[in-house]
Image (cartoon, grey):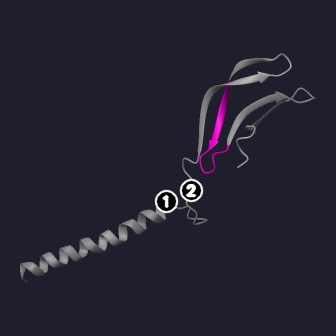
Amino acid sequence: MPKYLTNLKAISLFALLLGVIPDFTAAESKDLSTGVKPEIGRYQLFQGSYVALDSKNNRTESEQAVFLIDTSNGNVFKYSTGLDSNGKLFEYWKPTAGLNER
């Protein structure tokens, strides 16, 4: 067999593999049960400080909190805890005022 035909076969095989590999990796990055690509990295957590205004006493206080950012739409939530009327602890993500309405 001439050498140029052997090289042509090798090039054809390489081109075929290039066409198959991206499809294989794309299939791997989707949830096989739903076919939906997961949103890896959509939510970001960070700890930071903010200034709270006490309007009754007309003063400000620096507070520390944990925040959750939804990077797909820019909404920011603050981690909050408290006690209900029975003394039971509750936890929730409170939307930050004014920033989540777009």
Tell me, yes or no, whether the highlighted magenta stretch contains residue 97: no
Residue 41: x, y in percent?
54, 47
At a point 83% along the width and 22% down the height, the residue shown is: 55
Residue 12 sits in which quadrant?
Answer: bottom left
For marks 1 and 2, give the CA distance.
8 Å
Residue 80: x, y in percent?
75, 31
Residue at mark 1: 29
- Residue range (magenta): 64-75
Residue 69: mark in rendering = none
Judging depth in this view, the residue of 13 and 94 nearest the camera is 94
Q: Which quarter of the rendered picture does the N terminus lie within?
A: bottom left
The amino acid type, in three-letter code, at marker 2 is: Pro
Above or below residue 27? Residue 98 is above
Residue at mark 2: 38
At a point 71% along the width and 44% down the height, the residue shown is: 100
Structural crowding at the residue carrying mark 2, measured as other residues with C-alpha within 10 Å and reported as few (<14), some (14–19) or many (≥20): few
Residue 101: x, y in percent?
73, 47
Q: Earlier in the sequence, mark 1 or mark 2?
A: 1
Mark 2 lies on a secondary structure that is loop
At a point 36% along the width and 71% down the height, the residue shown is: 20
Above or below residue 31? Residue 91 is above
The amino acid type, in three-letter code, at marker 1 is: Ser
